Amino acid sequence: MSGDGDGWRMPAPPYRGSWRLHGRFWPTVRDDPADAEAISHKLSVRAGLVRQLAAGLYTVTPMGLRVIQRVEAIIREEMDAIGAQEVLMPVMHPAEIWEATGRYGLAEQFRLEDRGGRRMVLGMTHEEIITWHAAREIRSYRDLPQSWYQIQTKLRDEPRPKSGMLRVREFTMKDSYSFDADEAGLERSYEAHSRAYARIFDRAGITWYRVESDVGMMGGSGAHEYMAPSPAGEDVVARSADGGYAANVELAVSVAADPAFDDAPGAPEEFATPGVGAIDQLAELTGLPPAALAKSVVVVSDAGPVLAMVRGEHQVHEKKLARIIGPHRAAHPEEIREWFGAEPGSLGPVGVDPGTVRIVADPTLRTGHYVTGANRDGFHLRGVVLDRDFTAEVADIRTVLPGEDAVDGSGPLDLVPVIEIGNIFKLGTKYSEPLGARYLDEDGQEQVIIMGSYGIGPARVAMAAIEQGHDDDGIVWPTGIAPFDVHIVLIGDDDSPQGAYAADLWQSLSDHGLETVLDDRPELRPGEKFVEADLLGCPIRVTVGKRTLPDGPLEVRIRRTGEAHEVPLDSAADRILALWRGLAGA
């Protein structure tokens, strides 16, 4: 502690990134938050890393900030390594810049007016702003390529903030943007970022997948997401065992095994199905597998009613369907009765007026013949064949199922819940065209700049690490982003012989490059210190007590495995450094 002689004391200043805990703010708690479901939410609060202000709004404590800063340090090193240059843009933006790209008024966007009545936006991302600057600063092909990045606050009017720091309304993000003269240059920038992301996530010590993804509101010609597998994940990826195929289920396709069809009748045959409205009931009545039945789902797009059809074992994927028909809603019962003359459960495509109802069928329906609704309550048709008995647009609109084969032949697919930790987008000219970001080529001709956008959420990386690294006692951090490399637990007072040794060891470890926290809080019992050390989860724990002196050995424990080592006192710092390097793979 540092201070004056009158009893006023502040915590000791850090030494080479190391802390002494006496007097420091580290608010751990014993019990899980009442509303917490995700393990990262529970442990980040209990371990004193974050505190909630309101729904989706969190304060990061000094201990939590150390983790975030370690993630950010890795990000900066790897972004700098590919030639990206750090900038810092405002959080508040003039609305007219967003209007130019058509993104003003997004549901997730915070909007306000200043005292002069000028409409403003609180940035949820910075494509518009970086492009506005590029349009004014990049003039010639000689200025290209460029890559600019920042680590900045974002705000998103999240409708359902939950899971602690995994879904919030305010967050910090690394967003970078590439500017190239042509598509070939974009490909090189995209791959450079992809390689940098692989190094970032590997150094952070988490398991991750790179998967194909939908461009969503960002737009552009292609995108990939970086996903960390976790039961707390709200996204799902379809992935083959060797990772040869991996895609967000919003884009994933698969090979569904066809059922054994007998010969199709010459025309659809109507049969009675009283009280049957669900696929499982129809399968039981007919003795057919769900794959031989067709499911009909009615929605309403801006252009009118749509009948979406998939095989009975599948579900219509709303986002896949939206990419084809645009925004839509479920049809009301009275609308369905008007258009089809029957109730849901007895609907089908045969006899439907294509001028009134748009029909979209999944490609799996191209093979074989199916049982569909007859558009008459209590009746179905067997032997319905696409392109013979009805016509439809054919497009992938179904969810994939686990066990279906990957389209690249890499084997059956597994569906894995994941946390999105990063994304990369080929924006092309989506933003540069409307915002006038152009350059003069070698012939003096004006060309539109080709752009890419690349994001990482540092807090999401930290929370993913907790989801993947924990046990009954608390967090088990990977070495790359742990709040400290070593946690020394002092059993005794500062002015005791073991207190003096612990202080010397703390300084020696710090001089060896290991950021070390020394728990020298006099008010805590030994058991409490051990509990909090396990809860925080630093890679190595060292215990210094009465039995340590005068001859040792020093007790050193590996957090992840629980493995204990006895280390001689006279070479303790060197031995602990060697243990840490072994854990880090250095």
Image (cartoon, rainbow, N blue to C red):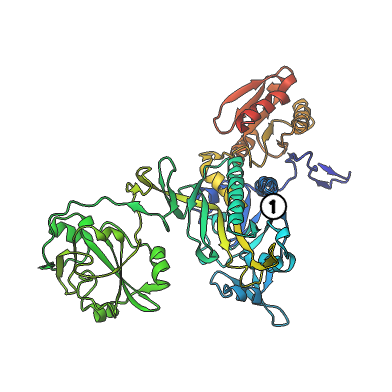
How many neighbours does mark 1 have within 10 angstroms: few (below 14), some (14-19), or many (20 or more)?
many
**How far across and down, in percent of the image, does residue 517 sit?**
71, 37
- The image shows residue 143 at horizontal and vertical percentages of 73, 59
In this rendering, is residue 472 above or below 261?
above
Residue at 23% of width from left, 77% of height from top? Answer: 340
Q: Relative to 561, is 279 on the left or the right?
A: left
Query: What residue sits 43% from the left and 43% below the top?
Result: 244
- Which residue occupies the extreme front position in the image? 443
Above or below 49: residue 552: above
* Residue 364 to residue 230: above or below: below
Q: Quadrant of the C terminus?
A: top right
Near-viewer residue (325 or 140): 140
For the residue pair 8 and 429, the one nearer the viewer reads as: 429
Question: In the rendering, at what x and y percent does residue 582 appear?
Answer: 62, 28
Snapshot quadrant of residue 128:
bottom right
Seen at 57% across and 72% down, the residue is 103
Report how many numbered discs are placed on residues in the image.
1
Q: Is residue 129 above or below residue 147?
A: below
Dividing the picture into quadrants, the one containing residue 117 is bottom right
Q: Is residue 456 visible?
A: no
Location of the N terminus by quadrant is: top right
Q: Front-most of 385 and 110?
A: 385
Give me the residue at 53% from left, 72% from top.
107
Along the horizontal axis of the image, is 227 left or right of 522? left
What kind of residue is marked 1?
Answer: Ala
> Can see residue 115?
yes
Q: Residue furthest top?
A: 551
Reading the image, the residue beneath label 1 is: 84
Residue 109 position within the rendered picture, expressed as x and y whole percent measured from the top left: 58, 70
Secondary element under disc 1, as helix, strand or loop, is loop
On screen, residue 86 versus residue 541, left or right, reads: right
